Amino acid sequence: MNKSILLAALLGLATLSAPAQDLPERGGATTTPPAVTKPTPGRDAYGQPTVNAYNLIRESTYNRYVTFNAALRYGVSLPMGTQRDYISQLSPANALLTMEWQFPQNFSLGLQTGHQYSQQQLPRQLTTFSSGETISAVQTRTLTLTPVMATAAYYFSDPAAPIRPYVQLAGGGAFVNYTNFYGTLADTDKKFAGAIAPTIGVKVFGKREKGLGGEIQAQYQNVFYKYNEINGARNLMLSAGLTYRWY
C-alpha cells in the first residue's frame, strides 16, 4: 500500500515538471501561430517615419512651414508695341523689389514694386500741336513706371532646394508719369493704370537650405495706359540680382 502511494506521488511530480505541449484541437487540427505584421517601408513599428538622411532632408523647416523670401533685382527693358513709337531705345535704369510668402506646397504669394525709367532725346525739329501752334525744339521724351502688383508663383522644386526655377504671374497697377520736354516746355500726363506681368525665372542658392542666393528673371509687362503715341505701355524686362530666404 505504501509503495503504491509513493509511486503515485512520483508520477504526479513528473507530470507537473514536464514542459507543456500544444494539444491538437478536436478534429486533429493544430493551432497556427499568429502572423507577424511587417512594418510599412519608411516607418517604424509604431508607424512613425524612420530617421535617415532622406527624411531629415524632407523635414526641412522650409518644407514644413510658411517661410519668407525677398529679392532685389536690377534690369534692362526693351520697349514693345506702341511704346516704341514714343521711346524706341533700350532702358538701362530699372529696379524691382519682390517680397514672397513661400508655402510648403511649392507655390508662393507676394508683392512687387519698383522703379522703371526710360528716356530718349530727338534732334531739333518743328512740332505742330493740336492747337495749331508750331515750335522748333529738341524733344526729350521720358516715361516713368512705378508698379505695385500682387504675385503668385509656382516653383518646380521644393522650398529648400538649391536651384528653384519658377513661373509667376503678377497683377495690379502702375503709376505712370509721361513727360515730353520741348525745350523748356513740357507735355505731362500722370495717372495710375492697371497692369499684368507674366514671368519666368530661377533662384540659385548654391546648396540646400542656404539663405542667400542669386536670381535671374524675364518679365513681360503690360500697363494699360493710353496717351498720345502710347496705347498700352509694354516692355520686356530682363533682370538679375540677389535673393534671400528665411524662416
Image (spheres, rainbow, N blue to C red):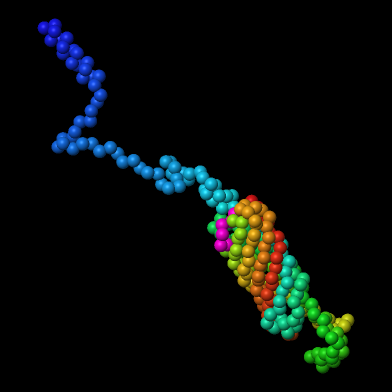
Task: Identify the residue at horizontal 72%, vertical 82% (top origin).
Answer: 84
Q: Position of residue 110 (x, y in %)?
A: 64, 62
Task: Identify the residue at horizontal 64%, vertical 51% (top origin).
Answer: 247
Task: Identify the residue at horizontal 25%, vertical 24% (top origin).
Answer: 19
Identify whether 103 is placed above or below 19.
below
Q: Position of residue 99 (x, y in %)?
A: 67, 60
* Foreground pick, 225 / 208: 208
| Residue 223 visible (yes or no) | no
Quadrant assignment, res 121: bottom right
Is the N terminus in the top left, top right, bottom left or bottom right quadrant? top left
What's drawn in magenta, residue-wise?
155-160
Quadrant assignment, res 43: top left
- Magenta-span inclusion, residue 156: yes
Identify whether 14 is placed above or below 157.
above
Answer left or right for 198 relative to 48: right
Quadrant assignment, res 66: bottom right
